[in-house]
Amino acid sequence: MGEIVFVGLGLYDEGGISLRGLEEVKTADKVFVELYTSLMPHFSIENFERISGKKLHMVSRKELEEENGEAILKAAETGKAVLLVPGDPLIATTHVALRIQAEKLGIKTRIVHGASIISAVIGLSSLHNYKFGKSVTIPFSEASETPYEVIAQNKKVELHTLCLLDVKAEEKRYMRIHEGLESLLKIEEKRKEKIVAMDTLVVGIARAGSTNPTVKAGFLKDLLSYDFGEPPHSIIFPGKLHFMEAEALMVLAGAPESLKEIVE
Amino acid sequence: MGEIVFVGLGLYDEGGISLRGLEEVKTADKVFVELYTSLMPHFSIENFERISGKKLHMVSRKELEEENGEAILKAAETGKAVLLVPGDPLIATTHVALRIQAEKLGIKTRIVHGASIISAVIGLSSLHNYKFGKSVTIPFSEASETPYEVIAQNKKVELHTLCLLDVKAEEKRYMRIHEGLESLLKIEEKRKEKIVAMDTLVVGIARAGSTNPTVKAGFLKDLLSYDFGEPPHSIIFPGKLHFMEAEALMVLAGAPESLKEIVE
């Protein structure tokens, strides 16, 4: 029996993988890659094949979720299969399902971690990690009120909320900050709990992990029309701010000076 | 004016840095490293200097926090200074303070992300990321009841709690799982809210990012005496489990079969 090594690609392009991850690729018998659970805008399969000296086999959502990653399991029966995954592996539940199945078949599994959008966005925002509550994804479908409820629940206990934005890789649709905000405003219109309003403080973050990320803090009404550039985008709704967090948002993210008045 | 690039070292040893991070080091005028905010047990300065071809200047807590990173700011006045940081940079607030100060002086700053203990531990546990509430650090000092309160607050709304364990790098003290659990049991004795009891389900994780991490789920009474091996250690207190999370804990982390009965 062989093994599956889940290797994180980190963020943005082929420079995001760790040295250890690249070594695992170089010594693999077969290398698969999935690029649908997250957007890596500048990841080039050709460049990666050149750097690693290995051919990459692209795995679609259908192959991974409906066919249960059969090709990967087959390759791992007799050798070392690597599955390259955007960000840090096994954050997406579909990888966990594959891992469980492999171990049940007697195939060993290992993980090589990569930079994750979750910690990258927290670092870029300069907000304190231990003040984040539950995170949530804002979906393209507007039926779900979950994101609104999560923000409300976190605000009640003064915590920050990280909102990831929906990715429909097969349709090349990546939600942008203004779309996420508009979706929440529609729920606000219905619920009227004053959770997401025009004067709510918001932090928008674009292209985490690239050499030119955009991080902008401001009131929702101003961020609606702010040009964040290319995706991927994320949104943070801050809870109560520590004075150092407020200073960081003013100095590093162009937040309005009036923030000074709303800190702890 | 020059710049400061904060580069994440990722986890465990010198293989955790990304390809992009290594490039930044190779093109730096001066390279600093701090190794006190997190434990990287097998990080070898000699190996890293060999790989990168650069000399590393170690920065102590005192230099970074009391002297405000003067040496780094000085190097960044005229050239490119890199500060190597365990995990993903700017999760520790001390780096945020340095970044604010640099930008105020007109020194540009950038971040190259690395794998973080936060997402690594979530991935290793196989628990669902969006079901984690606020995280907390269990300190060596037993005076603080904050960790107990955070677990209680998360449990009330059925969320998981990630507990990082205290690091006192200068004294070479790294809290172990049994110490963290014992510290919480002492608070339980006082508060008697049945948040942390002998039959509470716990997941212990050791050496995230290494080639031989230990991940073990079980009842607190069993994990107290379980041999997790060398640090760093972390603890997760699961909230309500989805059936897939329960299966993952049983298959991948040796959780007792009786978990089946306590899922959603």
Image (tube, coloured by chain):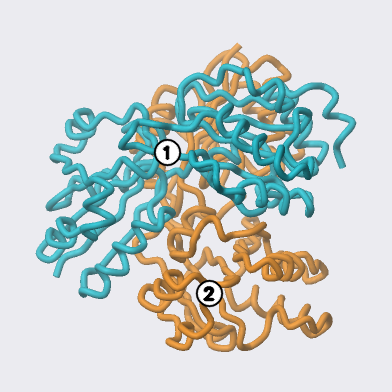
Chain colours: A orange, B cyan
Q: CA distance from mark 1 to mark 2?
A: 27 Å
Subunit ID for the residue under disc 1: B
Q: Can you identify the residue that label 2 sits on?
A: A264
Using the image, tell me which numbered label, if any, was put on residue A260: none
Q: Quadrant of the N terminus of chain A?
A: top right
Kind of element beneath mark 1: strand
Q: Amino acid at mark 2?
A: Glu
The vertical placement of B174 against B241, above or below, is above
The vertical placement of B106 against B139, above or below, is below
Q: Can you identify the residue that label 1 sits on?
A: B167
Q: Residues within 10 Å of mark 2 (few under 14, many from 20)?
A: few
Q: Is residue A264 left or right of residue B184?
A: left
Q: Position of residue A205 (x, y in %)?
A: 49, 68
Q: Position of residue A129 (x, y in %)?
A: 51, 56
The vertical placement of B133 against B45, above or below, is below
Q: In this figure, what is the number of numbered marks? A: 2
Subunit ID for the residue under disc 2: A
